[in-house]
Image: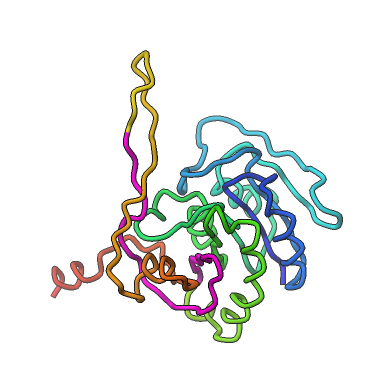
Amino acid sequence: MRILITNDDGIHAAQMIPLVQWAQKLGSVMVVAPKVEQSGKSQGIELHESFEAKKIDLFPGVTAWAVDSTPADCIRFAVLGLKESFDLVISGINRGFNMGTDIMYSGTAGAVFESVSLGLKAVALSTSPEYYDHAVEHLDHVFDYILSNSLLDHCDAYNVNIPPQGERILITRQGGHYYSDDFVPVGNDYFKARGKCVYQDRNDMSLDTDAVMHGNISIMPLTICRTDLRVYEDLTK
C-alpha cells in the first residue's frame, strides 16, 4: 500500500513522525505537507501565485516535501505535480477536533476532500489538544476497524475524531456547531477572531459531536457531493 500523509498543522507538527512510523506498518509512506501551519484553510488552493515546494529530510527512508501552501495544494502537488499515485491519504493527526459543521473550515478535511476529487481514498484524523501526544496509540484499533469492516469499499473518505481514552468506535453523521468566534478589536481598525465552544449536547450518539464528547471514537463517512438530493428529487418528480 502506498500512503500519502499531510497535516494542516505543518510538516513539523509534533505528531508527524510518530504517525509516519505507525503508517509504515501499512506500507510505503510519502509526506507532502504545508511548510507552516495552514489550519482553517478548508479546501483552498493557490491559483495566482507560485509557491515553494522543497524536498526535506524528515524521517529516514521517507520522501518528504514541504509545500508553502494549503493542505489541498499539497495533495494537488503530490498527484498533479509529482505525478505520484497512492492507495490511501492520511490527513492529520490534527491538534483539535474536526467535527460537526466546523469541518467545512478544516484544512485537515480539505485535504481529504481534495484527495477524493482526484480519485483517492482518504482518512482525516483529529484529536483534542490535551490528548494530542497519545492519539497515535489508538490507530491500530481505528484502522483494524476500518479495514476489517471494509469501510473504504463503501465510501472513499472518512473523518475520524479520537477523544481521550476513546475505546468504543461509532459510525456517525455530522452534528452541529462545535466552535465559533467572537471578533475582538485589537486597535487601528484591526480585529482578531477569538474562539469559543458552542457545543450543545443532544445526547444523540449518531452525531459525531455527541459521540466524541461522550468519549467515543467517531468515524464519519464523507462525500464531496454538494447537491441536496432530497430537494433535487422533490423538484424533479
Residue 206 found in image quarter: bottom left
Q: Height in image: 173 above or below 96?
A: below
Residue 173 found in image quarter: bottom left
Q: Residue at x 36, y 25 (%)?
A: 191
Residue 231, position as x, y percentages in the image: 18, 67
Residue 118, position as x, y percentages in the image: 54, 59
Outermost residue toward the top in this view: 188
Outermost residue toward the bottom in this view: 148
Residue 191 relative to residue 7: left or right:
left
Q: What quarter of the picture does the C terminus occupy?
A: bottom left
Residue 181 relative to residue 122: left or right:
left
**Magenta region, residue range:** 156-182
> According to the image, what is the colour scheme of the structure?
rainbow
Q: How many marks?
A: 0
> Which sits in the foreground, 111 or 173?
173
Residue 167 relative to residue 103: left or right:
right
> Which sits in the foreground, 79 or 147?
147
Residue 147, position as x, y percentages in the image: 60, 81
Q: Height in image: 60 above or below 28?
A: above
Q: Residue at x 62, y 78 (%)?
A: 141
Q: Height in image: 77 above or below 49?
A: below
Residue 60 found in image quarter: bottom right
Residue 103, position as x, y percentages in the image: 41, 55
Q: What quarter of the picture does the N terminus occupy?
A: bottom right
Q: Residue at x 32, y 36 (%)?
A: 182
Asked if residue 69 lies in the magenta stretch, the reply is no
> Which sits in the foreground, 80 or 41?
41
Asked if residue 160 lies in the magenta stretch, the reply is yes
Outermost residue toward the right in this view: 60
Q: Residue at x 62, y 76 (%)?
A: 143
Q: Height in image: 43 above or below 35?
A: below
> Which sits in the foreground, 2 or 41?
41
